[in-house]
C-alpha cells in the first residue's frame, strides 16, 4: 500500500508557500491532498485566500470542521 502524503494547510504564510511550492514542483513529493482544519472562526480574508489557493493546487484541499470552536469554548 502506497503511503499518502497529506499537507496540513493552515492557510497562513508557511503552509500556503509549501503548498504552492509543491504545486510548482519545487519540492517533492507532491501531496496527495491537503487538509484545512476549519475552526469556523477565521477572518473572512482567510476564507477568501483559501478559495483562491485551492484553485492553484493540483491536489484537493479538504476542509474539515467539528463546528465553531469559539462558540464551543464560550
Image (tube, rainbow, N blue to C red):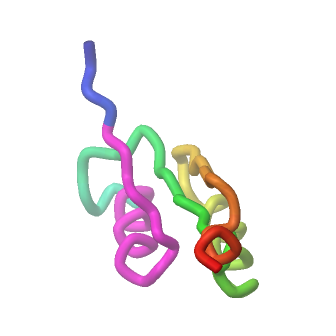
Q: Is residue 70 magenta?
A: no
Q: Residue at x 64, y 77 (%)?
A: 70
Number of numbered tags placed on the structure image: 0
Q: Quadrant of the C terminus?
A: bottom right
Q: Is residue 44 left or right of residue 9?
A: right
Q: Residue at x 39, y 57 (%)?
A: 8
- When the figure is inspected, residue 53 is found, relative to residue 64, above or below; the finding is below
- When the figure is inspected, residue 28 is found, relative to residue 27, above or below; the finding is above
- Nearer to me, 10 or 26: 10
Q: Position of residue 40 (x, y in %)?
A: 68, 70
Asked which quadrant contains residue 43, the reply is: bottom right
Q: Residue at x 32, y 32 (%)?
A: 4
- Nearer to me, 19 or 27: 19
What stretch of residues is rendered in magenta?
A: 5-23
Residue located farthest toward the front when viewing the structure as drawn: 74
Q: Is residue 6 magenta?
A: yes
- Nearer to me, 64 or 24: 64
Q: Position of residue 39 (x, y in %)?
A: 60, 68
Asked which quadrant contains residue 42, the reply is: bottom right
Q: Is residue 5 left or right of residue 70?
A: left
Q: Quadrant of the N terminus?
A: top left
Q: Position of residue 36 (x, y in %)?
A: 53, 59
Q: Position of residue 63 (x, y in %)?
A: 62, 53
Q: Is residue 60 left or right of residue 41?
A: left
Q: Residue at x 59, y 47 (%)?
A: 62
Amino acid at each position: 500500500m502506497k503511503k499518502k502524503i497529506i499537507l496540513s494547510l493552515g492557510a497562513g504564510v508557511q503552509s500556503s508557500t509549501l503548498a504552492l511550492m509543491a504545486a510548482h514542483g519545487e519540492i517533492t513529493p507532491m501531496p496527495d491532498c491537503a487538509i484545512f482544519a476549519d475552526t469556523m472562526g477565521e477572518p473572512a480574508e482567510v476564507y477568501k485566500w483559501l478559495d483562491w489557493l485551492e484553485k492553484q493546487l493540483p491536489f484537493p484541499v479538504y476542509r474539515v470542521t467539528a463546528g465553531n470552536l469559539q462558540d464551543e469554548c464560550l
